[in-house]
């Protein structure tokens, strides 16, 4: 009796593998076409693998709690010659099924000819080496020149599978001399290194618009006036004090929860950006934060921040609206999970149900960039909505 391979199907547009979590049938069981026989788990959901046709389970080649790539043979199904031919397996005619290794080898070879890889839509083939591979010789050369792998992102590799060879690298370095070169400042190099390390994580973004009329009205009545970034910082601090889990960091298989709500804020300085930190921002009111905030801004612009006013924060607030920008997707610092962005305010129409007409309001966009390993879109959206709600009631900050 012919043997039909049971193949790991493509379970999603970007799914490359799945983990076996349950056997729904056992060897010897009779199954129908499209009957669920295996339960698997992907990084998205729990799904089932169905029988390709009617027959009996010959054997499984997989084990529980182990992952297998799309296209892998998970086991074999004994079926009729008619069903085998219908599936496109040109199996040899003869004395029917056999238990010898030759018969199994023929079945496997014919399966490989007929069963094509089912991966579709992936940006690269599963298990492809790619251009990230570097020989020990090239790593030493990069270290010698004080470069990073990210500096070679634009180098086209001529080696196998697109790998960058030492010849490609030396040609790239020689070509640099033909261009105008200037020395990057130490701050620019530091920012570049931080962003390079940050981008090794999957960064995602959510955004919404918020009415700033209540905030502007509050600022008119307050002296000294709190800046928009400080208001956003205080709102974020209050929201994280209510639930600090979104600011946790993933280290291995552990989530490290913050011990205090220390929030940084971006200040543009000469040739870069500095991030002063307000410690325990949840424990002081907005009015109490105005003076220390303004002092830190002044010190940052002079590049004279004290050591205890930098580092160790759990999130950052950046007001890109000061540059006239309405929308941006900033990147969290390497040691952080979150960055709140605030866009420029603009006049926009909003429907007023009580008046039955559109009324003009001052509106701005808020964005929240986050480490997708720690936080999902729903949690990020709830956190951002809470920040927006708090900004609409600034007197409570």
Image (cartoon, helix red, strand yellow):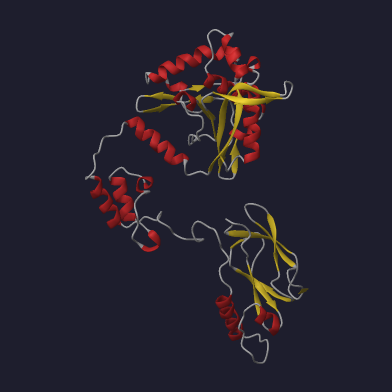
Residue farthest along the left direction in this orientation: 178
Q: Quarter of the image containing the C terminus?
A: top right
Q: Position of residue 96 (x, y in %)?
A: 68, 89
Q: Position of residue 344 (x, y in %)?
A: 51, 25
Q: Quarter of the image containing the N terminus?
A: bottom right
Note whether 311 is above or below 26 in the view shown: above
Residue at 49% over, 25% down: 321
Q: Position of residue 269 (x, y in %)?
A: 38, 24
- Figure quadrant of residue 61: bottom right
- Figure quadrant of residue 263: top right
In the image, 44 versus 323, the foreground residue is 323
Residue farthest along the front direction in this orientation: 357
The reply to whether residue 241 is visible in this rendering is no
Residue at 57% over, 82% down: 105
Q: Is residue 174 left or right of residue 275?
A: left
The reply to whether residue 121 is visible in this rendering is yes
Q: Is residue 199 left or right of residue 256?
A: left
Note whether 171 is above or below 356 in the view shown: below
In the image, 138 versus 9, the foreground residue is 9
Residue at 39% over, 19% down: 301
In the image, 125 versus 278, the foreground residue is 125
Residue at 53% over, 20% down: 228
Total number of numbered discs in the rendering:
0
Q: Position of residue 359 (x, y in %)?
A: 64, 22
In the image, 322 versus 17, the foreground residue is 322
């Amino acid at each position: 009796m012919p043997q039909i391979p049971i193949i790991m199907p493509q379970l999603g547009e970007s799914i490359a593998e799945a983990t076996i979590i349950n056997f729904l049938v056992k060897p010897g069981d009779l199954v129908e076409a499209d009957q669920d026989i295996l339960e698997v788990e992907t990084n998205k959901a729990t799904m089932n693998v169905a029988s390709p046709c009617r027959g009996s389970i010959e054997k499984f080649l997989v084990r529980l709690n182990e992952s297998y790539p799309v296209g892998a043979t998970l086991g074999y199904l004994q079926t009729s010659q008619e069903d085998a031919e219908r599936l496109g397996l040109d199996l040899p005619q003869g004395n029917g099924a056999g238990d010898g290794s030759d018969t199994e080898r023929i079945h496997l070879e014919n399966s490989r000819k007929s069963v094509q890889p089912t991966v579709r839509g992936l940006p690269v083939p599963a298990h492809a080496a790619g251009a990230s591979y570097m020989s020990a010789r090239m790593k030493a050369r990069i270290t010698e020149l004080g470069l990073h792998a990210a500096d070679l992102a634009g180098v086209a590799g001529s080696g196998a599978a697109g790998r960058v060879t030492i010849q490609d690298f030396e040609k790239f370095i020689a070509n640099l001399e033909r261009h105008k070169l200037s020395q990057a400042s130490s701050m620019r190099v530091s920012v570049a290194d931080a962003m390079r390390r940050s981008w090794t994580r999957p960064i995602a973004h959510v955004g919404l618009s918020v009415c700033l009329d209540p905030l502007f009205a509050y600022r008119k009545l307050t002296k000294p006036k709190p800046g928009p970034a400080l208001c956003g910082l205080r709102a974020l601090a209050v929201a994280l004090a209510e639930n600090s889990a979104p600011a946790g960091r993933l280290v291995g298989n552990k989530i490290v929860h913050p011990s205090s709500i220390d929030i940084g804020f971006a200040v543009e300085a000469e040739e870069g950006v500095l991030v002063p930190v307000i410690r325990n921002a949840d424990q002081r009111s907005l009015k109490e934060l105005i003076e220390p905030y303004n002092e830190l801004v002044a010190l940052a612009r002079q590049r004279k921040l004290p050591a205890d006013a930098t580092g160790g924060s759990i999130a950052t607030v950046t007001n890109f609206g000061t540059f006239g920008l309405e929308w941006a997707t900033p990147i969290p610092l390497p040691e952080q999970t979150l960055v709140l962005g605030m866009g420029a305010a603009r006049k926009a129409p909003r429907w007023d149900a009580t008046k039955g007409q559109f009324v003009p309001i001052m509106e701005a966009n808020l964005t929240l960039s986050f480490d997708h390993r720690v936080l999902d879109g729903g949690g990020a959206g709830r956190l951002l909505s809470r920040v927006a709600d708090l900004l609409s009631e600034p007197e409570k900050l």
